Amino acid sequence: MQLYSTKNLDHKVDLKRAVFEGLPPDNGLYMPVSIPKLPSSFFEKLPDLNITEIGIEVCRCLLGDTIAETDLRNIVETAINFPAPVMQLDEQKAILELFHGPSLAFKDFGARFMAQLMSYFNQGEEQDLTILVATSGDTGGAVAAGFYQTPGIRVVILYPSGKVSPLQEKQLTTLGHNITALEVDGTFDDCQALVKQAFLDQDLRSKIRISSANSINISRLIPQSFYYFDAYRQVMDQGKKLVFCVPSGNFGNLTAGLLAHKMGLPVHHFIAATNSNDVVPAYLREGDYIPRPSVRTISNAMDVGNPSNFARMIDLFSTAKGRGVPTDNGIWKDMKGMISGYAFDDPTTEKAVQSVKTTYNYTIDPHGAVGYLALDSYQADHPDTLGLILETAHPAKFREDMERIMDGPIHIPERLAAIENDIKVSVKMGIGYKEFSSWLKDNLL
């Protein structure tokens, strides 16, 4: 498998290098040189496959002979050993539950697969690998769980102080061992900027082996495509036009859906659902991509003002690979033909949480509630569709807001309750790169 930079088609690397580099040296993002279509035989046998078997088939098609069959099977079977069930609300709407992994968030799919893949590629390396990851909430917990005690790999998680939920913060800051949490006095965008700057710092990279576990790393997106195929498997007998509604922050999740579509998944339409951080819905409406500082909301994992994976979305809709730009009118028209964007504020989101509970007796988290609102808006004009809302995290991860909205207690899974009283350990950090790079050198060399 070969990959190129979204900023330079001529810069090509193999999968191992793309995974370990995270970002190309030109600050683009890695994309597959070719995205093959799955054979018709895959879809013929799809009803009889489980999500792990689907993952193996997708990887075999996409990765080719990059990884030996036995090793590939072991990577996927170890990483993807939990379900992603579809819960039907009514004839038009269903929920794709992606919170059945160890950290109770969809990012378990990407983080666990990445951990296994990096461990495989890291065999025989003498120097430890350091994973840098910025999180707006769920990524950090999933990465911490996925890489915990992985030999030869250290993890440094940057998260915005006071802008993740208490239980999310405990998932980042209580494991110890090879996991370190940096509590940044800023926003998620500040955290992400520090990580990106580290990857462009050649002096740092000459001293420390670093890689990323954010969705800027292509190995995060590959396994996230698995559950799109598995969701289709679960509803394909209904024979309806399938719409995926994706609560979106950094847009890795939606990009993975587009990847699945490119590989042959029969998707009628995608919906990009955001909170007040509506940079991409605004682009889909107006054709102008204008990043701006993120604002804090109750759906905190989506508080992103300059989503990294938008560059991949542009590339997927561009005929000039490695040279696509948001101002290309053709890209904009094609993208808005396949993706609709909607944005909702906190008060509207809270009412949606209450409405879903009252109407369907289903407890949906604030991120899923944004998705519900977006799908409802879309289906007002497209009632002949079946919409799947990606429920990206268990409601209990947002306990304080959920109990306030629901005016009563909600169920807390044991794996979250068990860490509630654990002691938080974090390192305070400003938003300046000099302080961050000095800490890395002082603590990792």
Image (spheres, rainbow, N blue to C red):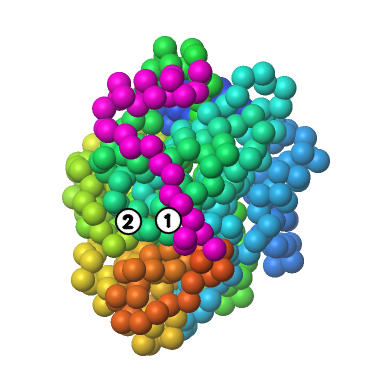
Looking at the rendered structure, the number of numbered marks drawn on it comes to 2
Residue 371: tell me if it is visible: no
Query: Measuring 38% from the left and 83% from the top, which residue is drawn there?
Result: 357
Residue 58: tell me if it is visible: yes
Please tell me whether mark 2 sits on a helix, a strand or a loop: helix
Instruction: Name the amino acid type tagged 1.
Output: Gln
Question: Which comes before the other along the chain, label 1 or label 2?
Answer: 1
The image quadrant where one finds the N terminus is top right
Circles 1, 2 touching at the beta carbon (< 8 Å): yes
Vertical relation: 200 (above or below) 268 = above
Mark 1 vs mark 2, foreground winner is 1
Q: Is 433 in front, or is 55?
A: 433
Whole-percent x, y for residue 300 in the image: 32, 56
Whole-percent x, y for residue 235 in the image: 58, 72
Whole-percent x, y for residue 174 in the image: 49, 49
Direction from residue 181 to residue 236 in the image, left or right = right
Query: Measuring 26% from the left and 32% from the top, which residue is drawn there?
Result: 431
Report crowding for label 1: few under 14, some 14 to 19, many 20 or more residues within 10 A (C-alpha). Answer: many
Vertical relation: 69 (above or below) 85 = above
Please tell me whether mark 1 sits on a helix, a strand or a loop: helix
Task: Specify the segment rendered in magenta.
Answer: 418-445
Which residue was labeled with disc 2?
300
Membership of 432 in magenta stretch: yes
Report crowding for label 2: few under 14, some 14 to 19, many 20 or more residues within 10 A (C-alpha). Answer: many
Membership of 19 in magenta stretch: no
Whole-percent x, y for residue 144 in the image: 53, 45
